Amino acid sequence: MDIILKYFSEFSNTQLEQLKALEELYKQWNEKINVISRKDIDSLYEKHVLHSLSIAAVYHFDAGSRIVDLGCGGGFPGVPLAIFFPDIHFHMVDSIAKKLKVVQEVAEATGLKNITVQHTRVEDIKDKKFDYVISRAVAPLKDLWNWSKPLIRKSNTEKSDDAPAPGLICLKGGDLAKEIQESSTRPYVTAIKNIFKEPFFEEKYILYIPK
């Protein structure tokens, strides 16, 4: 928890309790369903929670926004972001039902009311519209963008000036030059090492593609 408070300070008591609860909840569920690498579970707050919150360190979302987390796995980046942004709805989508069960149980145990889950393939939710798509290392950028485009609603003039236009925001790592080129997109790229100083974030990036 200390590593979260190193970079973020304006949490309510409820948010603090929710963040503190994540460690025990994920350790318990990881014994039953392997949603986090065994070697990473002891670094939950750095490698999963703080990594997810890097999006919140860069982007502000207006209250009432709807966000879909594609391929959410056990709940990252969506669960930490749902704690950080209690006035925003997060729709968590994955093709593996048992991982969504973990998300649902963690949401219920922490009292998160702004999370819904859907067991489906990305290709099968094109009838829904969202302000933003978020994702973490689920697929190549080309595929992510192709899946995301039909889900992102058209921009409107009601959003605040500091909120990004509707689009895809994803967490990626490593050398992304080829992946970006193959995607035929021009994402805004933020190096997380410029936000968080831990060595883990050395080659981690936030990519944002507005629709």
Image: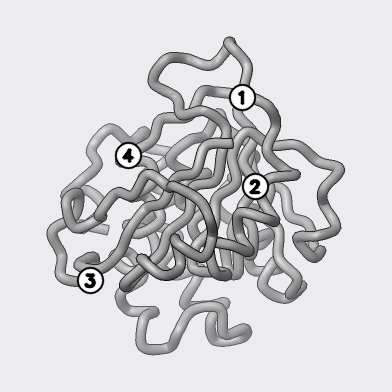
Separation of disc 4 and disc 2 at Cα? Answer: 18 Å
Q: Amino acid at mark 4?
A: Val
Q: Do the numbered discs 2 and 1 sit on residues whose CB atoms are within 8 Å?
A: no
Give the labeled residue for mark 1.
64
Give the labeled residue for mark 2.
68
Which label's residue is closer to the chain start, 4 or 2?
4
In front: label 1 or label 4: 4
Residue 205 found in image quarter: bottom left
Q: Amino acid at mark 3?
A: Phe
Q: Amino acid at mark 1?
A: Gly
Give the numbered dot on residue 200: 3
The answer to whether residue 78 is above or below residue 95 is above
Separation of disc 3 and disc 2 at Cα? Answer: 26 Å
Separation of disc 1 and disc 4 at Cα? Answer: 19 Å
Which label's residue is closer to the chain start, 3 or 1?
1
Dot 1: element: loop
Please state which of residues 186 and 24 is positioned toward the viewer in this rendering: 186
* Residue in the picture at 36% in, 81% down: 40
Give the labeled residue for mark 4.
58
Q: Do the numbered discs 3 and 2 sit on residues whose CB atoms are within 8 Å?
A: no
